[in-house]
Amino acid sequence: MRDTLAVDDIGSVVVTAAAAGDVRALEQIVARYHEDMTRVCVVVCGGDADLAGDAVQSAWPIAWRKLGTLRDPDRLRPWLLTVAANQARQLLREQRRRSVVELSVGEWHSGPDDPADSISSVDLRAAVRRLDPDERTLLALRYVAGFDSSELGLALKMSASGVRSRLERLVVRLRRELDDD
């Protein structure tokens, strides 16, 4: 995981050029941050990789359109990850309104990918999926993107201490749920 305190490796010249409409500059930004955005969105979307991919794809045009509003180019990564997380939450809200449930039916087989071999990670994924999108966003930005409490506060419009308390309660709740299983 990258050190989030380090200055982004995409320079302000590239950010300024992309904001002015330079497609090649935007391509550099996409190449550098697309994977980070996808990882955050997968967690926010409860493991739904297709929905996460849709969220990231819908985040890029928004990011490009609003890139000129970014005051500090060194904060590009946190800003992009926040845009992507917000898009993931928006898609989840839209999906809930449609409320169509798709069931996948497949054959049961035991083999090298048998979930019983990694039951604790299966339990954790299930517990995270049961969280609401805002809680998954908090976890994704903290543990996947590596945001500290100040960055989380800015992204989620909360105080840093409020973020720490909410995150602590969330982690305690997850641990308790996993211990009950």
Image: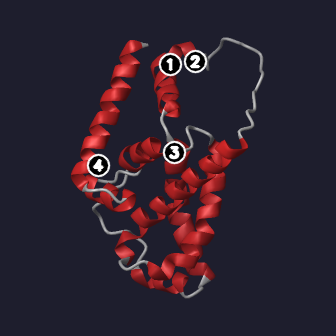
Protein image colouring: secondary structure
Q: 158 left or right of 123? A: left
Q: State how far apart marks 1 and 4 are (Cα).
A: 31 Å
Q: Earlier in the sequence, mark 3 or mark 4?
A: 3
The numbered mark at residue 118 is 1
Question: Vertical placement of 17 versus 141: above or below?
Answer: below
Q: Residue at image x 38%, y 57%?
A: 156
Graded by Cα atoms within 10 Å as few (under 14), some (14 to 19) or many (20 or more), the crowding at tag 3 reads: many
Residue in the foreground of this view, choosing between 148 and 133: 133
Residue 83 image position (x, y, % from top left):
50, 63
Q: Disc 2 versus disc 1: distance between alpha carbons?
A: 5 Å
- Answer whether residue 44 is visible to the viewer in this image: yes
Q: SS of the residue at dot 1?
A: helix
The x and y percentages for residue 143 are: 37, 44
Q: Compare marks 4 and 2 and give the one earlier in the sequence.
A: 2
Real-space CA distance between mark 3 and mark 1, rounded to the nearest whole angstrom: 22 Å
Residue type at the position of mark 1: Ser
Q: Are marks 2 and 1 in contact (CB under 8 Å)?
A: yes
The kind of residue on which mark 3 rests is: Val
Q: Mark 3 and mark 4: span between their CA atoms?
A: 17 Å
Cα–Cα gap, marks 4 and 2 = 33 Å
Residue 24 lies, with reference to residue 139, above or below; the image says: below
Residue holding disc 3: 44
* Residue nearest the viewer, comparing 142 with 162: 162
Q: Which residue is mark 4?
A: 163
